[in-house]
Image (cartoon, rainbow, N blue to C red):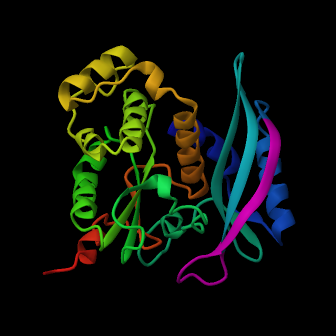
Amino acid sequence: MSSMLKLSIILTIAGSLAFAGGDSDVLRYVKAKLSHNPGVKINRVEVADKLPIPGIKGWSAYVMALDINLTRGKQTRRIKFEDILFVSKNLITSELVDRKTGRDVRSMIQPKLPADIYSRDHLLYGNPNAKHKIIVFSDPLCPFCRMSVPGILKAAREHPDDIALYYYHLPLLALHPASGTLVRVMELAQKEGKTDVVEKMYKIKIDPQLKDEKKILDIVAKQTGYSVTPGQIHQPWIEKKLGKDRLTARKLLVSGTPTVFADGKKDVTRERYKTFITKK
């Protein structure tokens, strides 16, 4: 789902402070807000999780799971996503800011990591029994990813007993359509043990707006030496794996790249991995 589309839905839910009493009041509030939009049909709304807010008393973060049909003109799309509402004993709001620091409280919230987050099929580098575990959600054409992710990959590759790196794809297709093809190539390369191809994708020179799959694959072959066919990158297992990555990102409220978790905690600096390397 594009960030603009999600924003329009969130704005539908957002509003001034509303009174709350418990989970049922939160659900009624969200449903009432969504119902104000004639283009929205509610399939499901539920409280997926309820989390404390570090350092802020009297408020909880409600992770809301939404399943709706959104109609715009003649087009109707089914959309599933998660969002956060902040709830106190008597109030509900979609935005909460720490007055002392000016920090958006949303950035402090981290849902529980799924039990299978450290699955073998997501292990790109390192020993699964390594001292530290890093999770990366990334898009190879994201400029910020290109600045920080290569260093993380290199550290995990060179220090397998210190760092186990679990890689999740989150191509930002609205910004970089070409990433849709690149991540498929990366999945296939990883499956074949050609992890060097994964790293090369962060240096590949390509127009992020390119959508012609054949041209993209030709560029990949020329610049990385890894040649594949459209049929190879559209195998069912790849579709399933990328779908799982999107679902995991959604559950963890990950919408931007790169998003990094170091030993189970969100690492906003994206540099904590440097402290994990054993000095010789």
Q: Which residues are magenta?
A: 41-59
Which residue: 45% across, 28% down? Answer: 233
Q: Left or right: where does residue 77 sit relative to residue 144? A: right
In which quarter of the view is residue 180 placed? top left
Q: Left or right: where does residue 83 sit relative to residue 175? A: right
Q: Is residue 53 visible?
A: yes
- Which secondary structure type mostly characterizes the magenta part of the structure? strand
Which residue: 45% across, 32% down? Answer: 173
Q: Left or right: where does residue 65 sit relative to residue 213? A: right
Considering every residue shown, the one lying at the far front of the view is 192
**Is 137 or 75 nearer to us in this picture?**
137
Where in the figure is residue 266, as x and y percent of width and height? 44, 68
Which residue: 76% across, 30% down? Answer: 39
Which residue: 54% across, 80% down? Answer: 54
Q: Is residue 175 visible?
A: no
Q: Left or right: where does residue 226 sit relative to residue 113? A: left
